[in-house]
Amino acid sequence: MNKTNSRSKANGQRAAQETSTRDAILNVAEDQFAAAGYDGASVRDIQRAANANGGAVFYYFGTKQALYEAVFERLVEPLLQERMRRLSLCANPADAAPRLEDILAAYIEPSLRDGFENPRRRRNFAHIQTQLLQSHHSFMRDMLARHFTRTGASFLAALARALPDLAPRDLQWRHHTMVGALAFAMAGTERLRLGEITETALVYDPADTEEALSQMIGLMTAVFRAPPAITCERV
């Protein structure tokens, strides 16, 4: 083997090793950020669990914040792409209004079934998304806006076409309700408990994905089709 081939092979092996190390860090960081939050997770612990050298996080990502953003982007982008793909299928060539149920399915189904590689990824995403919603870190608010503004606006526009008589305020409140209910459902079956009711007293299975999809789409359809909420003018 000549020197050029040897050098090329060595470069390829080094690149593969770097990719492997980077992915290992992302995998561990995802679990630790989901469990402990941004402030609670330790860069040192992430490196140790990923079997990476000290300083590896800073070598591959630059900062802890950049690592957190990379973890979230890897989780959220496939979900958003699948939602937008499904929403595009709701478009009617005759320019008729899309069906409400189709729009809701395009939003909900990727969250509960098609948008993640496995249930662990789905739970991790839900936990990290909750952190973003509750955090005092300004960069996290920026992350939410950066990833969700475009898709949120697209779904709200489609919903407005499907429900032209619904006031924008009512439409946005119902969208807000759907996002919250869906985030709760995605967070894991251990959280789906009703007060003090024990698991043996449950008459439904929170882990049944197909039932969850049917229930969520049916319930959210009813929410969006409900009459406008009655409000009283303040005196």
Image: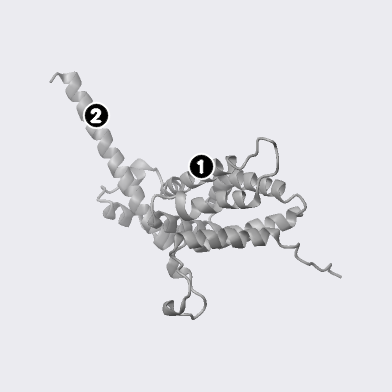
Look at mark 1 in the image and give the residue it sits on.
Answer: 81
Q: Is residue 40 visible?
A: no
Q: Of the residues under marks 1 and 2, which one precedes in the sequence?
A: 2
Residue at the limit of the structure toward the left, as seen here: 1
Q: Quadrant of residue 20?
A: top left
Foreground disc of the pair 1, 2: 1
Please say if 30 is above or below 2: below
Image position, residue 142 (x, y; %): 56, 48
Identity of the residue drawn at 69% across and 55% down: 172
Q: Tag 1's secondary structure? A: helix
In percent of width and height, residue 98 lies at 66, 45
Residue 130 numbered tag: none
Circle 2: residue type: Asn
The residue under the point 58% across, 40% down is 88
Instruction: Report the residue marked by disc 2.
Output: 11
The residue located at (49%, 62%) in the rendering is 211
| Amino acid type at image mark 1 | Gln
Question: Viewer-proximal residue, 173 or 83?
Answer: 83
**Are the residues at dot 1 and dot 2 in contact (C-beta closer than 8 Å)?**
no
Q: Nearer the viewer, residue 141 or 85?
A: 85
Q: Secondary structure at mark 2?
A: helix
Whether residue 168 sits left or right of residue 202 in the image: it is right
Gap between marks 1 and 2 measured at Cα: 33 Å
Q: Residue at x 55, y 63 (%)?
A: 215
Q: Position of residue 217 (x, y in %)?
A: 58, 58
Image quadrant containing the N terminus: top left
In the image shown, does 12 or 84 lie closer to the viewer? 84
- Label 2 crowd (10 A; few <14 / some 14-19 / many >=20): few
Residue 103: image location, x then y, percent: 61, 49
